[in-house]
Image (cartoon, rainbow, N blue to C red):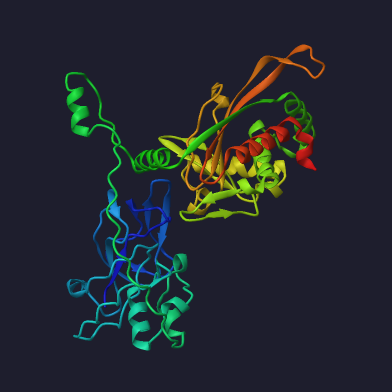
Amino acid sequence: MPTEILMPALSPTMEEGTLAKWHVKEGDTVSSGDIMAEIETDKATMEFEAVDEGVMGKILIAEGTEGVKVNDVIAVLLEDGESADDISATPAVAPEAAPAAAAEAGPAGGSDKAAPPAPAAPVKDGKRIFATPLARRIAADKGLDLAAIAGSGPHGRIVKADVENATAAPKAAAPAAKADAPAAAAIATGPSTDVVLKTYADRPFEEVKLDGMRKTIAARLTEAKQSVPHFYLRRDIQLDALLKFRSQLNKQLEPRGVKLSVNDFIIKACALALQQVPEANAVWAGDRTLKFEKSDVAVAVAIEGGLFTPVLQDADSKSLSALSAQMKDMATRARDRKLAPHEYQGGSFAISNLGMFGIDNFDAIINPPHSAILAVGAGVKKPIVGADGELTVGTVMSCTLSVDHRVIDGVLGANLLNAIKDNLENPMTMLA
């Protein structure tokens, strides 16, 4: 039976993408693991691998097509003995809101009897269990509970081999259906396109089409600013000790080709502060908070048309030189849109540094589900009062901590920002 290939979800938040390029054409033989296409998401261009073997029977979505919904059929794969004439008889594949891959084929050609449609995708604990249509049919025939089977396909998807090797077990009772919640009122985001166009109808302008990244940034930050109860804490941080210490370290590290930036120290200071104030190392999860043992810190990286926030995992336990090397690598790949989804998702805390652009201070918008983001301004020479009470000149950096009040209260946020300040003003302690 011909196999419908679905538009994959290459990240948990992906809803649609652009089919940037096909690596196969109709009539080509496809093997498991072959690169079939390149899919452009709002964040990156990623390769899409085949799961099964067969012959590319028909390509339904042309290269360059934008706005292809996840789980839309993009092509049809044929098994041995099948031809393009069999495609029209292919039963519809039940859509699955999941990281999709090439679905598994049914019994090989020769039969005039179409295979029965796959059972509906099962649900466990309110979440859909991802399995290919053939795997669901085999599981139904064998009386298998898909919730008890570990998937070996892409993103944990259950495939044919998984259910063929499994033994029958009692099925878990389906959760009781919940009444549909009333539809939420649409959030007003400003005047409509028609209204704006009419307003400027007599003025020359150029319409700039929004790409997927820009649309996603607009939607998510609008939602974040309107739904997350932000509050802001500000501190001036004196950098003279850090700048002197950095200069000494860089001289010693020069033979190794390592050059630490001020931002490397800021990442380390924030990661350690999350350990020093562990109650703040948490995220909002709807009806609960998740508190983490390690410090995973996201850092905003500007790219053409938007930004990425690569996540430095376990930043609290990494050396400054390791953080520096990892940050340089991730920033380079971010600008080339070569980061994998797991490299820019997650974390509990973020850093946005505009000091290098001469910005003294600013307020950053929290990127949910993070609980806080540190906005970092430029280090500026200012008059300060020294420890002995005398007026002197020092390098001062203004920082603003934007905080989600659902997770972090005022005193807790103040403790976190104070810990960041103490780490930066006493940089040697970060090596202890």
Q: How many marks?
A: 0
- Which quadrant of the view contains residue 265? top right
Asked if residue 265 can be seen in this view, the reply is no
Residue 295 is left or right of residue 255, and the answer is: left
Compared to residue 66, the image places residue 389 above or below, namely above
Q: Position of residue 307 (x, y in %)?
A: 46, 38
Q: Position of residue 92 (x, y in %)?
A: 23, 71
Q: Position of residue 397 (x, y in %)?
A: 64, 24
Quarter the C terminus occupies: top right
Instruction: Give 1 or 116, whichever is nearer the viewer.
Output: 116
Q: Residue at x 41, y 56 (%)?
A: 10
Quarter the N terminus occupies: bottom left
Instruction: Give 131 or 19, whichever is nearer the viewer.
Output: 131
Q: Residue at x 24, y 81 (%)?
A: 116
Q: Residue furthest right?
A: 388
Instruction: Give 29 or 303, whichever is nearer the viewer.
Output: 303
Asked if residue 425 can be seen in this view, the reply is yes
Q: Position of residue 296 (x, y in %)?
A: 60, 48
Instruction: Give 182 or 421, whichever is nearer the viewer.
Output: 182
Residue 128 is left or right of residue 67, and the answer is: right
Q: Residue at x 58, y 50 (%)?
A: 282
- Which quadrant of the view contains residue 174? bottom left
Compared to residue 70, the image places residue 126 above or below, namely below
Residue 241 is left or right of residue 90, and the answer is: right
